[in-house]
């Protein structure tokens, strides 16, 4: 995909407060991202994330108003298609995406997950990392595949686990690196330097055998 001619069209899926969405909006406002947020989509009509974009760019439906997961996903997929996104970023979207939806947008769907994948897929990652006595924790940006949190990992950011950490204090430390991690990862995606084929990520034509790492300057190496 060549996004040099126009801003990339980014759709964001979010269920909560939307600090990762805000980071993308800030990146656009400061010129770090040549993109526009064409829609924010949620399974929680009260999600604060929705408030960050004008009402005409919001889509929110309650899953319980649909007869099945497939019906919800179909409506979500149609709404996504209607805004023709180049990329769909799951940023705190807490609902599992069904296989049909993932396949419909295969290769354009990316998620930020608060753990050093493949460790701690799913929920309660901070509490589980603490319970396991990890010395390090962090966040990962990865392509979405039908299996939960199992797609190819583009990049990770690490933080230390400190003595006395609670799940909340650890989550707050991870969140601080999530924002630069997401921004740098989306910049890379928009640059067209990075592709994914069969679970392998290629950067500048070379296979990536381990995820890129965010350094203290906020760049990926
Ligand atoms: C982040 O920790 C994200 O990694 C996780 O949910 C949280 C969402 O935070 N999946 P926010 O809504 O972007 O502030």
Image (tube, grey):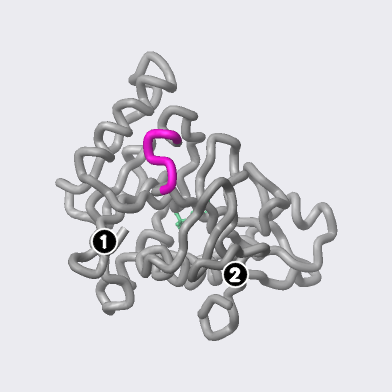
Q: Determine crowd level at label 1: few under 14, some 14-19, many 20+ residues with C-alpha closer than 10 A.
A: many
Is residue 45 in the magenta section? no
| Ligand 1 lies under 8 Å from the Cβ of mark 2 | no
Q: In terms of image quadrants, where is residue 136?
A: bottom right
Looking at the rendered image, the quarter that the C terminus falls into is: bottom right
* Residue ID for mark 2: 212
Please tell me whether mark 2 sits on a helix, a strand or a loop: strand
Q: Residue furthest front?
A: 205
Which class describes the residues within 10 Å of circle 2: few (<14), some (14-19), or many (20+)? some
Would you say the magenta stretch is mainly helix, strand or loop? Answer: loop
Q: Which residues are magenta?
A: 103-107
Which of 99/92 is in front? 99
Q: Is residue 105 above or below residue 49?
A: above
Q: Position of residue 41 (x, y in %)?
A: 32, 43
Q: Is residue 102 left or right of residue 114?
A: left
Image coordinates for residue 146, horizontal then vertical, percent = 54, 35
Work out whether 127 lies above or below 32.
above
Seen at 67% across and 64% down, the residue is 210
**Which residue matches tag 1?**
8
Q: Residue at x 61, y 72 (%)?
A: 213
> Residue 212, relative to residue 61: is it above or below?
below
Classify residue 176 as left or right of residue 74. right
Q: CA distance from mark 2 to mark 1?
A: 22 Å
Report x, y in % for residue 2: 28, 63
Quadrant of the drawing holding the N terminus: bottom left
- In depth, the one of 140 and 191 nearer the eye is 191
Element under label 1? strand
From this view, report whether residue 215 is shown above or below residue 166: below
Q: Nearer the viewer, residue 190 or 158?
A: 190
Q: Is mark 1 within 8 Å of ligand 1?
A: no
């Amino acid at each position: 995909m060549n996004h040099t001619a126009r801003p990339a069209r980014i759709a964001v899926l979010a269920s909560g407060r939307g600090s990762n969405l805000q980071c993308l909006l800030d990146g656009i406002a400061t010129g770090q991202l040549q993109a526009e947020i064409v829609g924010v989509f949620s399974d929680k009509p009260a999600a604060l994330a929705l408030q960050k974009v004008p009402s005409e760019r919001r889509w929110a439906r309650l899953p319980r108003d649909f007869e099945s997961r497939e019906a919800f996903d179909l409506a979500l997929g149609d709404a996504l298609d209607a805004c023709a996104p180049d990329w769909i970023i799951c940023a705190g979207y807490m609902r599992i995406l069904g296989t049909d939806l993932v396949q419909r947008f295969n290769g354009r769907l990316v998620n930020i997950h608060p753990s050093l994948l493949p460790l701690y897929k799913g929920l309660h990652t901070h509490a589980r990392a603490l319970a396991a006595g990890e010395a390090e924790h962090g966040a990962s940006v990865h392509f979405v595949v039908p299996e939960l949190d199992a797609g190819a990992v583009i990049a990770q950011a690490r933080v230390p686990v400190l003595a006395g950490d609670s799940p909340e204090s650890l989550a707050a430390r991870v969140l601080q690196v999530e924002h630069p991690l997401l921004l740098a990862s989306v910049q890379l995606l928009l640059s067209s330097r990075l592709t994914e084929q069969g679970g392998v990520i290629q950067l500048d034509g070379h296979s990536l055998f381990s995820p890129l790492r965010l350094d203290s300057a906020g760049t990926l190496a």
